[in-house]
Image (cartoon, rainbow, N blue to C red):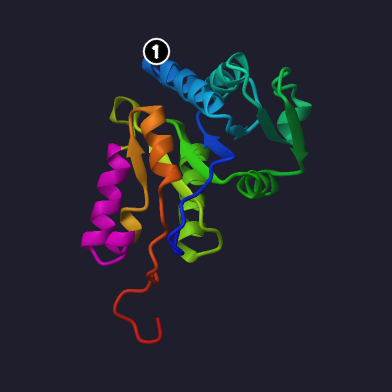
Amino acid sequence: MSNGQTTALRSVAVFCGSNFGVSPEYTDAARALGAAIAARGITLIYGGTSKGLMGVLADAALAAGGSVTGVINQRLHDRGHLHPGLSRHEIAPHMRERKARMAELADAFIALPGGLGTLEELLEAATLTQLGDHEKAYGVLDTRGFYQPLVAMLALATREGFLKPEHRDMLQIESDPHALLDRLAGWRRPDVSKWIGQPGS
C-alpha cells in the first residue's frame, strides 16, 4: 500500500463466471483457489450462487473448512440461486449494492475467468484502487491464458497515453492460487495520480 505496509488478507472477494467454461481446467482452477483461500484462514466473499464456477469455488472453500460469505442480489435470490451451504449470506437489492457490499467486506479482489459481469467487477475494483477510493490489491488467476488479452489491452492503453505504467502494473497476474495470494498480500498501491501531462494533476 502507499504507506509501505503490506496487507493482512482477512477476506478476499472473488469474481468469476456463473458458467463453467469449455475446459475442465477452469473448474480445477476455481476449486484450487477456494481450497487455497480456506487453507490460509481467509474468508471468501463472492456472489452467493451455486451456479458455474461460483458454485465450484464456494464448494471447495467450504469443503476445506473455510468461511464463505455470499452477497446475492434480490432477483437472483428470488429465483432460488442462493448457495444452500454458505457460512453466511446477505441479500442486496440490486447489483450495484451487491458490488459495493462485496468491496466493503473484502481486503483484496481476485477474478477467475468469466463473462461480462466478471470483467466489469474486476475493472471497477481496479478503477477504485487507481482513484484512491480504496487501497485494495486485485489480481487474476490466469487459467489457460484467459486474461492475456486484458494484459495486452492495458499495455495498449499505456502506449497510447491513457494509462500510466504504474497503474497498468497494479494488476497482479498468476496461474497458481498461492502465488497470487502471496502477491496480493505483499502489494503496495503506487503513489501517483492518474493524469498524464496535465497541469494541476
Q: Quadrant of the C terminus?
A: bottom left
Residue neighbourhood size for the residue with mark 1, other residues' Cα within 10 Å, grouped as few (<14), some (14–19), many (≥20):
few
Give the residue drawn at x 27%, y 60%. 165
Please state if 3 lies on the left or on the right of 107 as rendered. Answer: left
- Farthest front residue in view: 5
Residue 142's place in the image compared with 156, above or below, is above
Element assignment for label 1? helix
Residue 70 position by quadrant:
top right
Seen from the viewer's position, the closer of residues 67 and 27 is 67
Amino acid marked by disc 1:
Pro
Confirm whether the magenta stretch covers residue 160: yes
Q: Position of residue 161 (x, y in %)?
A: 26, 67
Give the residue drawn at x 37%, y 74%. 195
Give the residue drawn at x 53%, y 23%. 39
Res 74 seen here: no
- Farthest bottom residue in view: 199
**Part of the protein shown in magenta:** 148-166
Seen from the viewer's position, the closer of residues 70 and 20 is 70
Seen from the viewer's position, the closer of residues 9 and 126 is 9
Please state if 75 lies on the left or on the right of 14 as rendered. Answer: right
State the residue position of label 1: 24
Confirm whether the magenta stretch covers residue 140: no
Res 1 seen here: yes
Q: Position of residue 97 (x, y in %)?
A: 70, 48
Please state if 128 lies on the left or on the right of 43 as rendered. Answer: left
Q: Position of residue 180 (x, y in %)?
A: 39, 35
Residue 77's place in the image compared with 153, above or below, is above
Q: What predominant SS class does the magenta segment belong to? A: helix
Q: Position of residue 11 (x, y in %)?
A: 59, 39
Seen from the viewer's position, the closer of residues 150 and 128 is 128
Residue 72 position by quadrant:
top right
